[in-house]
Amino acid sequence: MQQVMAIFSIFMVVFYIGVGCYLVFFYNLTYLDKPIRVILGSTFIFYGLYRAYRTFVKIVEVFFTKDN
């Protein structure tokens, strides 16, 4: 089950970074102010990077370590 969750984490990383980039760079609707978009987008990007690091550590642990 840990292997499935590790793979799912990859999709979540792509989602968080994608939403963050969309909010910061490509979002053109007027009902959300630019400072709010940048703060939210930056938060999504940084959290996505954190999740990417944690996912990398988990994948190495699950797939590349030998069980005793």
Image (cartoon, grey):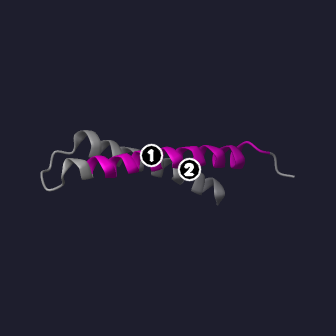
Question: In the image, residue 57 lies at what x, y percent?
Answer: 65, 45
- Horizontal side of residue 18 vs 25, given as left or right: right
Q: Residue at x 65, y 49 (%)?
A: 58
Q: Quarter of the image holding residue 28?
A: top left
Give the quarter of the figure containing the N terminus: bottom right
Q: Which residues are magenta?
A: 37-65
The residue mark sitting in front, 1 or 2, is 1
**Residue 67 spot, x, y in % from top left:** 82, 51
| Residue 39 magenta-highlighted | yes
Q: Which residue is mark 1?
A: 46
Pointer 1: residues within 10 angstroms few (<14), some, or many (20+)?
A: some
Q: Taking 2 as reference, is 41 left or right?
A: left
In the foreground, 11 or 49: 49
Left or right relative to 28: residue 38: right
What residue sits right under mark 2 in the picture?
Answer: 7
Please state which amino acid type lies under the numbered disc 2: Ile
**Image coords of residue 38 (percent x, y):** 29, 46
